[in-house]
Amino acid sequence: MSTEPAETRRTTRVRRRTPPDPLHPLDPLDPPHPPRTRAPLNPLSALDPRSLRWKIAALAAAASCAVAVAVGVLVHTTTYDWSLNVGRATALQALMSKATGDGDESGTILQDPVALPPELLRQVAAGKTVTWYDDTKPDEPWMWAAARDNGRVLAVKMDMGAERRSLQALDRHIVMATLAALAIVIPLAALVAELSNRRLRRVAGTVRRIAGGDLDARIGAGGRTRDEIGEISAAVDSMASALQERLLAEQRFTADVAHELRTPLMGLITSAELLPEGEVTELVRDRVGVLRALVEDLLEISRLDVGAERADHVPVPLGGVVEESVRRTGLPARVEVTGHPMADTDPRRLDRIIANLVANAHRHGQPPVEVSVRGTTIVVRDHGPGFPDTLLAEGPRRFRTGAKERGKGHGLGLTIALGQAQVIGAALDFANAPDGGAVATVRLEAGARD
């Protein structure tokens, strides 16, 4: 039979849950406080740009850059205006000194209108004394002061190159200081964010454990600062405790109902055997048999739920056990065994798993049903419509077959097979074959030998 990779796969791994102590039942007013679970640190997550750590660091960097830009623009503008004011005052003072013939020799005095810039002549024509900053050549800025005196124009120009270079140096220092601040702020923000990240990863890891069936998992956020993450942690712990209580109550109810039904059921079976032979009697006996199988399945599930089942591992010939299990079902199935595999497992529970998988293949699938044994892997396949998407996504659930086309049933067969697989330490996979049909794969523990 073909064991090609399936298109869609559902893998259910073994998860051990601590059974409740019958002498000390769980008190809803006193929930358990298991030790905190530390979320494993993935080294690759530190480099993931989608991580909350780097988003916070990027936000801190953006805020720092915004502050640095605002401060830099303010300092640049203030310094630039101050240098212009100083240049104007110096140019005017030099102009007055030149006009009166006393004072220092700073600046260059010009009286020829042809040598003056047109913009300066235009401005001086409208007033007596003006100043003008000439930055047409960025590398050679000048500050002009001009005045009209007895029909002539007297002008002085001051070199502003030193002020321009000082302003450029100030801008470079601001940029360097900003980069140095970012080099400190970004790692510090990432480090601070990692503290919250670690708490969030612990919450996510605990939620995944609860979703996987570990109802004893708790975050254990007691004593922490009551911030938003602490509130989420407390809410998750409260939800897990309430969920555990409800599931335990459901399990107890299922077990109690099954036990209560056994006594009247046995009387019903005895009464059915005493009925005279006939068509009606056969119908009654058949329905009573179905009811008896249902009650026995419910009792088995209740024992699996509370963790009361224990495996008895012994070395067994795997091929012979599977062939005998298929033969006892009384259902047609082709069995293919490669080699002579041996396995350390519980043959009674393995027989239960194989019988349920074969019965499920006949009840919900279509023939031919094929069973193959290769090494410590057992594959049961039919050629029907395959497993429904809900079963592949969520695993088998009691009293739910998943789709109408899968026929009638209570959905207990695969649930029991999954529970027994967990008891013997095996993995049970559900998938659909590419060419159609449901595929159930049992992988025994690695200690098995061929």
Image (cartoon, rainbow, N blue to C red):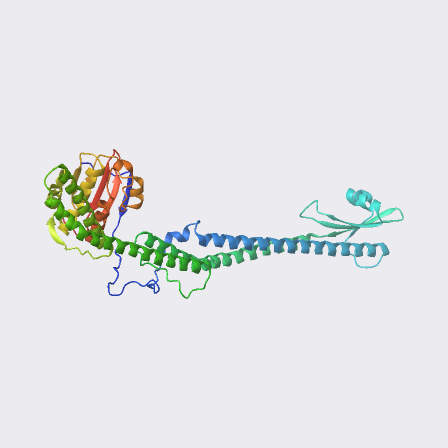
Specify whether residue 379 is in view: no
Where residue 340 appears, as percent x and y from the top left, is: 10, 44
* Residue under the point 14% across and 42% down: 285
Q: Residue furthest right?
A: 150
Between residues 357 and 344, which one lies in front from this camera angle?
357
Q: Is residue 25 above or below residue 335?
A: below
Between residues 171 and 30, which one lies in front from this camera angle?
30
The quarter of the image holding the N terminus is: top left
Where residue 82 appears, as percent x and y from the top left, is: 71, 56
* Residue under the point 22% across and 48% down: 416
Where residue 342 appears, as percent x and y from the top left, is: 12, 48
Q: Does residue 447 appear left or right of residue 206 in this picture?
A: left
Where residue 445 appears, as percent x and y from the top left, is: 19, 51
Q: Does residue 347 appear left or right of residue 155 in this picture?
A: left
- Marks counted in the figure total 0
Specify whether residue 110 is in view: yes
* Residue under the point 89% across and 48% down: 150
Between residues 242 and 168, which one lies in front from this camera angle?
242
* Residue under the point 85% across and 49% down: 128
Between residues 160 and 77, which one lies in front from this camera angle?
77
